[in-house]
Amino acid sequence: MIKRLAPVISVIIIAVIFRFFLLTSYPVSLQLDEINIGYNAYSILKTGKDEWGEAFPLAFKSYGDFKAPVNVYLTSASIFVFGLTEFAVRLPSALFGALSVPIFILLLKELGVSKRAYIFGGLWLSVLPWHVHYSRGGFEAVTSLFLTLAGVFAFYRSINTVASQKTSYTYFLVSVVSFALSVWAYHSNRVFVPLLFIFLLYTHRRQVRKLVDTKKRLALGLAILAVLGLPFAYLMFFTPAITTRALSTSILRDPGLIPNLHNGNYASMGELVFDNDIYLIFRHWLGKYLNYFDLRLWFWKGLQLTPSELPGIGLLYLVDLPLILFGMYRTVFSKNKRLRDLAIFWFFAGPFAASLAMNEQHPLRAMVWIPFFGIVATVGFDSFIKSVRGNWLKIVSLGYAAALTFNIIYFGDIYLRQFPRFFSEFWQYGYEELSLFVCDNHDKYDEIFITDTYGTEGPVNTGVPYVYYLFYCRVDPASFVANGRNIPKVSVKRPDWKLDSTRQSALLVGTPFDFPEKEVLGNLLLRQIDYLNGSPAFYIVEIK
């Protein structure tokens, strides 16, 4: 038994290593979404309310939008075990990222691929840079992808056993619950998962009818959907939780589209017919959608871990380019109708939700697309193994293994060395050191001012420093809410040097844009916090 499972166990171990090795150090710091999820999870654990005083909310108010609830509640459990730490915040995504590998293996097995093929598929996902990178941060999309994979696996398991096992209906219910939870886990899946579920129900409608062949079974399935779906409908129609997020990220807010719209003011009938707003919106969306099929995104610069002028890494390893293209070809002409139909659907539907947002080529919103690439890579591998024999198979296999190893080393160098150096500020690096210093010196000053300016590009960018203070200083959530969401003696505002330099006892935390030249500050400068590229991030200045 152990010998038979050894390859799967080995692949899972690789997945765990890639996601947990130096988890709290890479990425270099908790970015804003992670810190927000972490403190709200801590607040839920301690008080049953979020940082705004809402009891067990189904949508967590954030900065300009609302966050999905699944990861927050999972992080509460993680913090209960490990405390309010960076590891606890990143644990759910890393864990479900690693668990996605065995679930993907099980899905491939249900789709009818060979053992060597589904082992390869699991290995492919375990080292995939796209999935590894986001699994190492507290990203909701990773958990949502796991739940989506679990839903698809359970669905195919149910229809594969519908004629032979009484547990088939149980698998079907697990599928329904998994799909519903994935919708609650991440915003993009609110578009993709319903489309996927409708596709599965339609293409396998005969088997589904057999599964829900009694009124009791049908009623139970509908009851589960109602329990998980009605609160979502309530949030959509009676609160701003859903609409705020949709409007804030909508393609209709895209700066590249807005200036071109007529807003009903057409100069001529020809413009009304041939250049109307509906056409302009469709054309703009189509361009964004087709941009996701750019091979440069897939294999060259998709993860954006290095500046545009330097070599980077794509969502997928370059070594897999021939394998994926060959797999696409073999999938289209495959006799395995179930696998073929699912892959074709996933190919076209995968980037659809991401294309509706105003951002260009957003890898996180398009994460649900990963299984398509895994399926065709697996098909390409299996087809290649079957078509090549003898020494050629050994030569090509060794060549692929060597090239994959080189790709992994290259990814490791970018991820562990280049990415932190170039992009530490985009992960809010410096806020931890800033918060801990202020926390340790809180009682020494009458007033503390922390700038909301952030980054090297000038005072146009703003940060949210207070939540980092709440997290790293472990501020009691009940006290924070009771104080009107204020921190005693601490104010978030950009320092005004002419005014603030005359205070009696104050600590000023600002960026270089907020103060005179460093030399002028002299011994007033207590500490300088730098980004990992050497640029100054914050000055901490004492006024006494």
Image (cartoon, grey):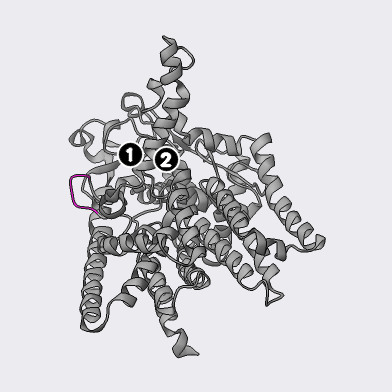
Of 393 and 81, the residue lying toward us: 393
Does residue 340 lie above or below 479 as drawn?
below
Q: Which mark is residue 445?
A: 2
Q: Secondary structure at mark 1?
A: strand
Give the mark count.
2
Label pair 2/1, CB-CB below 8 angstroms: yes
Asked whether 311 falls inside the magenta stretch, the response is: yes
Q: Find residue 122 and report its image quarter.
A: bottom left
Which residue is at a point 65% across and 52% down the rendered structure image?
A: 47
Of 308 and 334, the residue lying toward us: 334
Counting residues from the start of the chain, the first of labels 2 and 1 encountered is 2
Does residue 59 lie above or below 220 as drawn?
above
Q: Find residue 523 and report its image quarter.
A: top left
Question: Circle 1 is placed at which residue position?
Answer: 542
Q: CA distance from mark 2 to mark 1?
A: 9 Å
Q: Find residue 544 and report its image quarter.
A: top left
Q: Position of residue 402 (x, y in %)?
A: 21, 73
Report the magenta residues as a range.
308-312
Residue type, mark 2 in image: Tyr
